[in-house]
């Protein structure tokens, strides 16, 4: 009773804060903040694209708009020319993003619930007590789902992005939707979500791996080796129904490996179908004024080549402002390779925890992304809350929390010093970016090692149990 | 036999060559005319407007050598090679003060130009790549005039249409401006070299460099127009070189008789020698005509009549008579206000954009003067006379709003010029008698890509009332592409005559440039080329115009706003290495420590492994597997 009160009260508070901020007109304060909007997600640019379309030109004419034509058709009419001053106009233009946030939070909650259930199942199977649950009284603890729900809705970053005129909320919603689809084994939904997220912001392309693992192996579980260990111990204890069980197990494994392949093929199929539909719809939305190739050049290629050097939270803008033209392409490759090269090792090590893998990949993308905003941070924080059980003894949590607060305070201050006062220069703001990147590095590295440690801990416990059983 | 063949061939070749040369030598007609208009300005300065027109008649087009007596070969070659239909190049230094000096409408082929270099070219339709032609043209002109016009080869600075100036769809147009270009003598010298007499004889001897460059405003122009076969024969060329300069007289003995006049209202006397440092010793012998005109503006003539009238009679009765008396008489003889040191050869009246008054042009024929007997037109003021400058119907200004280097807005403001506008044809206050109820105002502007305009924020307000885009705003737009092309926009509104204010604003975000895209003095800011405001009668019938005998170009009034200066946020120019090392350190930290944490293995795992090194065991395993498979295969 208390739990649901906290959860739904928190949810209502999150939505209420958003609506209140919108009604107070804080969008005009936030919609040019470089931390909140990037050239790719900016609603001002979307309004410009909408205007160009209405005016009879291609929305990609000029370098204003870099988003999807679908968003243009969806949001364009809602926001109009963004010059409304009445509360009704403001609420209408923001309603979609509030809904998107709410949907994302609810999806996160159900993913979390599912994770909790499988988690306890696995632990039961292994016969190990959960270190997290063991510590505290079970009744007082909100599950991963509820925590994630609250973290996503009440995170100031999410609120800022939702209120401040950015399309990140919608991108995040599709990413979470695909994870939800994969977790609940709804293959078409997962494929559609992934295709949509990739179409909107390109970087979720790496999330195909966790989604595939999620579909094939189910949600996060301890390494399969542990199950082998615990099972090899179990027959030793009870010898009777050994053969029967073994046969069943073998059948299961066979079936599983066959169905795994089928599921992944199905995912590929649905993703391809969704991509086809998206492209067809884009073509329709572009009204023959622009080609799909042009669309690609203005969206994904624009993200890859980093043409817009407007300051943001990432490392790209200042680096590519300063770097010598001759090395530009080389460093573009280096920067993007930083994401791509890390995917195989992470997959090898963490494939049994796809949701956690998704969290790590999102965080890495948010760090080494051409136009990051706090919207990306909002997403990975929501995903991080899903893994709250594994990350319960995360080191430096206090440091990280303070780091994020520091960034959110000093970032705007330094920007103000540079852009408005003229007393600081670009280095001031870039220093904050470096701190932010380092902070995210610490978060990534610590999370990974925490999870590795958690698995090791489980292994120890299983071994200990085996030993006590054998003796 | 072979020898004879050679001779024969040579002879035939010679004949052919002679024939060609002979055919070509039936030269086209060439004509050179020079003139200077001197106009005293209301604030005591003097405007000098030199015009040198070089005409090349249409003739048979030969494929081989051409010979010109007067027409500069450099320009001819440029026109031929780059297929120019029409081209205008201007170098301007200083700022034309519309409020003090009025407009330039009275003068032929004179517009007020914004500072810096402006190049506008229309190419003849051909299958050649226009961008390539433009590129080569900019380089050729840059060599010819010793200016950095070649920077205009960058398509990010060039508009592909010329706005209101574009005449029909005859060929492609390119239009670019370099607002920052400093204009100097090195541009004037090649300009003078294009004249048949250079600066050795004729009016161009007056152009003494230091004086010209010390002037308040100075604009050098080259305008080339090829005959298109409609109004002028095909193959003909007209090169018009103009130099407009606003000078201050060096004659400090300026005296105003009558003690009641305050000191600052003194009007310095002037003469050609006090303005230009020397008097005129004859015309250019190659010129078919050479004239100096002294222009008295319509407003000045009106005031003169009034003053004369008051001085003569002091009564109200004679007022009408005096006003009706021919102004020529007033001027030709010395009057109570000023003396002319030379009597003009003739006086002509010219209606200059004004319906009620007409300006007077006093004509002096330079060919009658020589070195022994130089021409030195001058004016000595006897009494102070104030007159308002002949201004167009509207004043147009442009400015930037916004704070900081994040974003801002470009605001164009058009105000009605009620005070200075007495009876002008496009005057906003007068009840229109020619049946055209409204005025078309068009602004044309090229905005560099790093000023990212948000066209959805376009606001057009006429007298406090917002005009919606779909109703009544004519908009032509080519949006900016980053580093590829500028935004070019033309906003047209039809406003009623009694409008007092038109307000157009567009918001923008400031872009961020790479370190090597910044000019050496980046903190000075970046110039946006000025906007061109065109005012025209909405009814394009032009009956009233022909009735008044106006040139058709006078139906339009064009005003250039000043160049705008945008400050952009600059990076730290000394930081490339630091930024590269810092960023790469951050990335290395991420990459290294993440890999390290992934590599971690639990202690128990390590212990459970055999003491042999991991690689060797792996290799052994691999080999074993390989062998196993081999066995399977062979079996």
Image (cartoon, grey):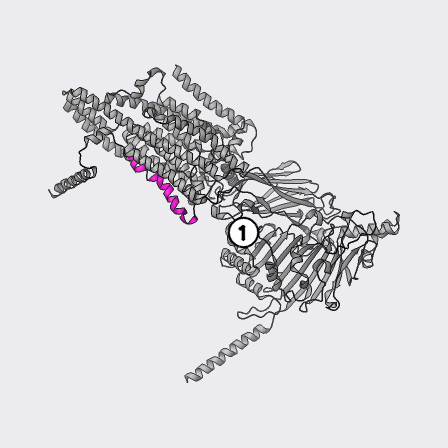
Residue B532 is one of the magenta-drawn residues: no
- Can I make out residue A50 in this image? yes
Mark 1 closeness class: few <14, some 14–19, many ≥20 residues within 10 Å? some
| Along the line of sight, the residue nearer the viewer: A341 or A31 | A341
The percent position of residue A272, horizontal first and vertical second, equals 34, 38
- Tally of numbered discs: 1
Q: Is residue B597 left or right of residue B234?
A: left
Q: Quadrant of the C terminus of chain A?
A: top left
Measured along the vertical axis of the image, is residue B324 above or below residue A390?
Answer: below
Task: State the residue position of label 1.
Answer: B160
Q: Is residue A8 left or right of residue A240?
A: right
The percent position of residue B142, horizontal first and vertical second, equals 54, 58
Residue drawn at (30%, 35%), measured in percent from left and top?
B596
> What's the magenta bit mostly, secondary-structure-wise?
helix
Element on which disc 1 rests? loop
Residue at the extreme top of the image, as rendered:
A1
Say which quarter of the image contains residue B252: bottom right
Residue at the extreme left of the image, as rendered:
B635
- Can I make out residue A192 in this image? no
| Along the line of sight, the residue nearer the viewer: B457 or A158 | A158
Residue range in magenta is: A323-347
| Along the line of sight, the residue nearer the viewer: B322 or A417 | A417
Chain under label 1?
A: B
The percent position of residue A139, horizontal first and vertical second, equals 34, 15
Say which quarter of the image contains residue B403: top right
Say which quarter of the image contains residue B29: bottom right
The percent position of residue A123, horizontal first and vertical second, equals 26, 22
Measured along the vertical axis of the image, is residue A136 above or below residue A417?
Answer: above
Q: Quadrant of the N terminus of chain A?
A: top left
């Amino acid at each position: 009773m208390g739990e649901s009160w906290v959860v739904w009260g928190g949810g209502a508070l999150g939505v209420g804060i958003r609506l209140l901020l919108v009604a107070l007109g804080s969008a005009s304060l936030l919609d040019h903040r470089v931390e909140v909007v990037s050239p790719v997600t900016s609603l001002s640019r979307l309004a410009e694209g909408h205007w160009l379309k209405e005016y009879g030109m291609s929305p990609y004419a000029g370098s204003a708009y870099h988003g999807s034509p679908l968003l243009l058709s969806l949001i364009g009419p809602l926001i109009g020319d963004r010059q409304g001053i009445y509360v009704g106009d403001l609420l209408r233009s923001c309603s979609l993003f509030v809904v998107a946030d709410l949907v994302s939070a609810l999806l996160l909650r159900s993913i979390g619930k599912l994770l909790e259930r499988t988690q306890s199942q696995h632990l039961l199977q292994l016969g190990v007590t959960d270190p997290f649950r063991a510590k505290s009284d079970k009744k007082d603890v909100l599950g991963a789902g509820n925590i994630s729900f609250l973290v996503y809705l009440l995170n100031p970053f999410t609120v800022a992005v939702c209120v401040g005129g950015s399309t990140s909320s919608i991108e995040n919603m599709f990413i979470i939707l695909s994870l939800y689809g994969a977790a609940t084994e709804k293959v078409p939904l997962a494929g559609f979500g992934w295709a949509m997220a990739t179409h909107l912001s390109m970087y979720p392309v790496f999330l195909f791996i966790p989604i595939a693992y999620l579909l094939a192996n189910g949600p996060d579980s301890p390494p399969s080796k542990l199950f082998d260990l615990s099972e090899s111990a179990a027959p030793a204890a009870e010898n009777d129904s050994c053969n029967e069980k073994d046969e069943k197990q073998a059948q299961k494994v066979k079936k599983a490996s066959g169905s795994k392949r089928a599921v992944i093929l199905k995912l590929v199929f649905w993703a391809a179908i969704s991509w086809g539909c998206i492209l067809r719809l884009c073509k329709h939305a572009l009204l023959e004024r622009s080609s799909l190739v042009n669309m690609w050049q203005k969206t994904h290629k624009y993200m890859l080549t980093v043409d817009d050097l407007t300051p943001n939270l990432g490392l790209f803008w200042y680096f590519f402002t300063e770097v010598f033209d001759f090395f530009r392409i080389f460093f573009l490759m280096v920067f993007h390779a930083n994401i791509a090269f890390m995917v195989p090792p992470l997959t090898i090590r963490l494939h049994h925890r796809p949701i956690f893998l998704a969290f790590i990949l999102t965080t890495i993308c948010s760090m080494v992304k051409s136009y990051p905003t706090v919207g990306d941070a909002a997403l990975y924080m929501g995903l991080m809350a899903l893994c709250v059980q594994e990350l319960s003894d995360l080191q430096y949590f206090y440091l990280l929390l303070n780091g994020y607060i520091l960034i959110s305070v000093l970032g705007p201050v330094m920007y103000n010093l540079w852009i408005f006062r003229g007393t600081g220069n670009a280095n001031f703001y870039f220093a904050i970016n470096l701190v932010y990147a380092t902070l995210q590095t610490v978060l990534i590295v610590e999370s990974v090692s925490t999870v590795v440690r958690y698995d090791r801990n489980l292994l120890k416990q299983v071994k200990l149990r085996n030993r006590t059983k054998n003796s | 036999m072979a020898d004879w063949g050679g001779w024969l061939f040579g002879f035939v070749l010679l004949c052919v060559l002679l024939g060609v040369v002979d055919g070509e030598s039936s030269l086209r007609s060439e004509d050179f005319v020079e003139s200077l208009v001197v106009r005293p300005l209301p604030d005591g300065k003097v405007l000098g407007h030199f015009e040198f027109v070089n005409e090349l008649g249409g003739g048979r087009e030969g494929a081989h050598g051409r010979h010109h007596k007067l027409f500069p070969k450099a320009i001819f070659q440029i026109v031929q090679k780059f297929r120019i239909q029409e081209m205008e190049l201007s170098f301007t230094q200083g700022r034309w003060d519309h409020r003090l000096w009025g407009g330039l409408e009275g003068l032929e082929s004179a517009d007020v130009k914004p500072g810096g270099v402006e190049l506008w070219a229309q190419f003849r339709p051909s299958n050649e790549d226009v961008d390539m032609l433009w590129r080569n043209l900019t380089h050729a002109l840059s060599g010819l005039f010793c200016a950095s016009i070649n920077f205009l080869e960058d398509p990010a600075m060039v508009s592909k249409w010329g706005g209101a100036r574009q005449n029909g769809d005859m060929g492609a147009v390119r239009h670019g401006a370099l607002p920052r270009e400093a204009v100097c003598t090195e541009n004037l010298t090649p300009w003078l070299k294009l004249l048949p007499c250079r600066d050795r004889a004729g009016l161009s001897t007056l152009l003494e460099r230091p004086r010209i460059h010390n002037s308040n405003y100075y604009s050098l122009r080259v305008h080339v127009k090829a005959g298109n076969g409609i109004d002028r024969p095909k193959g003909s060329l007209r090169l018009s070189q103009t130099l407009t300069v606003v000078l201050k007289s060096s004659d400090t003995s300026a005296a105003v008789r009558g003690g009641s006049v305050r000191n600052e209202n003194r009007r310095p006397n002037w003469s050609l020698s006090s303005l230009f440092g020397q008097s005129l010793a004859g015309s250019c012998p190659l010129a078919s005509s050479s004239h100096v005109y002294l222009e008295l503006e319509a407003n000045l003539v009106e005031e003169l009549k009034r003053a004369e009238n008051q001085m003569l009679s002091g009564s109200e009765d004679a007022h009408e008579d005096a006003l009706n008396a021919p102004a020529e008489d007033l001027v030709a003889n010395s009057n109570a206000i000023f003396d002319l040191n030379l009597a003009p050869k003739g006086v002509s009246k010219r209606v200059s954009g004004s319906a009620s008054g007409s300006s007077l042009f006093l004509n002096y024929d330079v060919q009658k003067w020589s070195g022994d007997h130089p021409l030195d037109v001058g004016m000595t003021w006897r009494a102070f006379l104030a007159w308002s400058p002949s201004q167009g119907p509207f004043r147009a200004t442009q400015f930037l709003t916004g704070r900081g280097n994040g974003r801002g807005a470009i605001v164009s403001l058009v105000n009605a010029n009620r005070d200075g506008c007495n009876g002008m044809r496009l005057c906003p206050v007068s009840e229109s008698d020619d049946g055209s109820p409204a005025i078309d105002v068009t602004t044309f502007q090229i905005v560099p890509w790093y000023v990212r305009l948000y066209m959805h924020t376009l606001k057009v307000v006429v007298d406090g009332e917002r005009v919606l885009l779909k109703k009544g705003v004519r908009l032509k737009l080519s949006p900016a592409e980053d580093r590829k092309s500028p935004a070019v926009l033309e906003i047209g509104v039809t406003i009623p005559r009694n409008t007092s204010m038109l307000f157009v604003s567009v918001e923008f975000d400031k872009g961020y440039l790479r370190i090597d895209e910044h000019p050496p003095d980046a903190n000075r800011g970046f110039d946006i080329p000025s906007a061109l405001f065109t005012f025209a009668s909405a009814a394009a019938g032009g009956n009233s115009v022909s009735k008044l005998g106006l040139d058709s170009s006078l139906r339009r009034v064009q005003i250039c706003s000043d160049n705008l200066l945008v400050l952009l946020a600059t990076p730290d120019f000394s930081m490339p290495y630091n930024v590269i090392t810092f960023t790469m350190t951050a990335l290395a930290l991420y990459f290294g420590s993440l890999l390290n944490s992934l590599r971690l293995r639990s202690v128990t795992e390590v212990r459970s492994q055999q003491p042999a090194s991991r690689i060797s065991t792996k290799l052994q395993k691999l080999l074993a597997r390989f062998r196993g498979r081999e066995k399977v295969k062979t079996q």
